[in-house]
Every structure is written in structure tokens, then in C-alpha cells.
Image: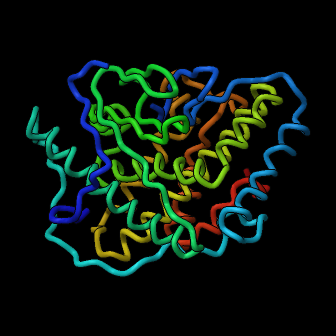
Amino acid sequence: MRWKGRRQSSNVDDRRGSGGSGFRFPRRTASSRRVRLPSGGGGKSGKGILTLVVVAGVAWFVFGINPLTLLGGLSGGSGGGIPFEQSRPTEQSTGTQRNDEMKAFISTVLAETEDIWNAVFAASGRDYEEPRLQLFTGQVRSACGFASAASGPFYCPGDKQIYIDLSFYDELRKRFDAPGDFAQAYVLAHEVGHHVQNLVGVLPEFNKARQSMSKTEANAMSVRVELQADCFAGVWGFNAEKRGLLEKGDLEEALNAATQIGDDAIQKRTQGYVVPESFNHGTSEQRQYWFRRGFESGETGQCDTFTDTRI
């Protein structure tokens, strides 16, 4: 991925070393849940699912569009960019050098997401509220409670911030066999996708609806939320390619990451069998499909996971 020499976001706070979520396994608090692992409420599914349909009305209010397509019809595109020299964060870098390079890389990717989503929102006559990114080590306190590095990257709707311990990217490469800078960019773009969902009302309505769902029902709806964030990440990828940032093999890196972190793949790796009713992010096939769908179309209107009968 060509990234050096491009603008870095000013919305990055470096809290590493201060001691003190999630891409995979964060804990929850009662007041403001991270975008992960829904809890069961014990109600009937009809009420909960019907409540979530309110999201369509929210999207209509926010974007002035057909509620059945959520963010439909908006192109993720903006103008092209000037490609820079090939420059990946090197796998051989270690210690401070690698951390500083990773910070520069992640700050650049965040800036690119800002450009894309500012353009998408502006096309509908709306302002995009840019999220802040918190870099931490070990553990961190957010409006969603405490989280450790083991939680992985996460987005907290309560403070509209993304939290990342950069050591996760080593885990992504080593533990999940998903190396590459575009795989790393996909992770951040996915969390930014949750921020977009929060701004247009998807996450608030989901958090309301889940209270009347059983754990299995809430897990199933969580899958739809997560897959939409994957699709939004794909929309960003479409624009990154349009700007001339992608290199040969970058798309494959992201698709491989989506495969390695699918619920079925993780359960097979960790326990040797799968429990579909416990899935809350989507299967490897689903995550690949929805990222590719956003990547190939570049249109947020293609990211309606809530009415798609194949999920």
C-alpha cells in the first residue's frame, strides 16, 4: 500500500505507556456497550427485530434517502490522488522504530477514511463528525469501560472513539496468519465503519433492540451490524484504489484477514468445532463477501445487511 508522504490525521491521541476495544472480544458495561458480543435480553425476536427496522427511518432522516437502502445511492468516491512510492511498514522493524512507523501508518489510514466519509456525508448535505483514535498499551479506560490489549481494536459509541493497541497487528500477522499493511488498514476501516453506523443511528437502535432479544437473536443481529461495517470498510478500499494507493496483492491481504477472523475460522482454530448460534461477527465467507461488495461497488447503498435474506 502506498501511504508515505500523505496527510496524517490530527485526530490521534497517543496514550501508549500510560497504562491506563473491540475487533474481537471486549467486555461490556451496562451504560455504553462496545460494538461487540451482544448480551441477551430474554424477549421475543419479533419485537427486537421490528425495533431495529427503525434504523431505516433514522437513515432517511439523516441522509434523505430511501429507508430500505439505509445509506443507499451515495457514492463513496472522491477525487483521485497522486500515488507515492511503494512503502510498507517493514516486518523487520522492531521496538520504537516499528511503533513510530505503525503510528504514522495508522494515522495516514485514518486521514484517508476522513477524506472518504467527509465526501460521502457532504454529498448528502450533512457534516461528518470525525472520530478520534486512541493508541494505548496494556489496558485503557473508555466511555464503554476498561479494556485490555487482548480485546483487540474496538469502537466505543459512548465517546465516539476508536481504541487500538498496536501490538494487535503483530497478533494479526502471527496468530491469525493475516500479514500485510492493507490487512491492517482493513481493521481500522472496519472500526470507522462502526463510527459511521453510530452517526446515522444504526448502533443506537441496535443497542435498544438487543434489550428485548435473546442472546442467540442478538448475536444474529450483531452479525448484520458487523458485516455492514465490513462493507463500509470495502467502500473505503474502493476509494483507496481510486486514489492510487493500492498495490498488487493488497485486496488479497484484506480478504485473507476477513477469512482468518471469521467466527467459524476462529472457533475451529481455538476449539476445533463451530457453534453457529454463537456467531456475532459473521463467517469467513460472509466477511469476505461483504468487504468485496463494498470494495467493488464503492457505494454504501450496497451495504444493506439488514434486509439481505442470505445472512
Image spot of residue 4 (x, y percent)? 16, 62
The residue under the point 32% across, 19% down is 20
| 83 horizontally vs 113: left or right | left
Residue 190 vs residue 145, the one in the foreground: 145
Residue 171 seen anywhere in this rendered image of the structure? no
Residue 170 seen anywhere in this rendered image of the structure? yes
Q: How many marks do you count on the picture? A: 0
| 160 horizontally vs 228: left or right | left
Residue lying farthest to the bottom in this orientation: 79
The residue under the point 54% across, 47% down is 194
Image spot of residue 71 (x, y percent)? 65, 65
Image quadrant holding the N terminus, namely: bottom left
The image shows residue 71, relative to residue 110, as above or below, that is below
| 283 horizontally vs 155: left or right | right
Q: Examine the image and state in which quarter residue 151 appears.
A: top left
**Colour treatment of the image:** rainbow
Residue 224 vs residue 173, the one in the foreground: 224
| 117 horizontally vs 97: left or right | right
Image spot of residue 260 (x, y percent)? 45, 41
Residue 118 vs residue 302, the one in the foreground: 118
Image spot of residue 186 (x, y percent)? 41, 52
The image shows residue 231, relative to residue 246, as above or below, that is above
The residue under the point 45% across, 31% down is 21
The image shows residue 85, relative to residue 288, as above or below, that is below
The residue under the point 29% across, 75% down is 244
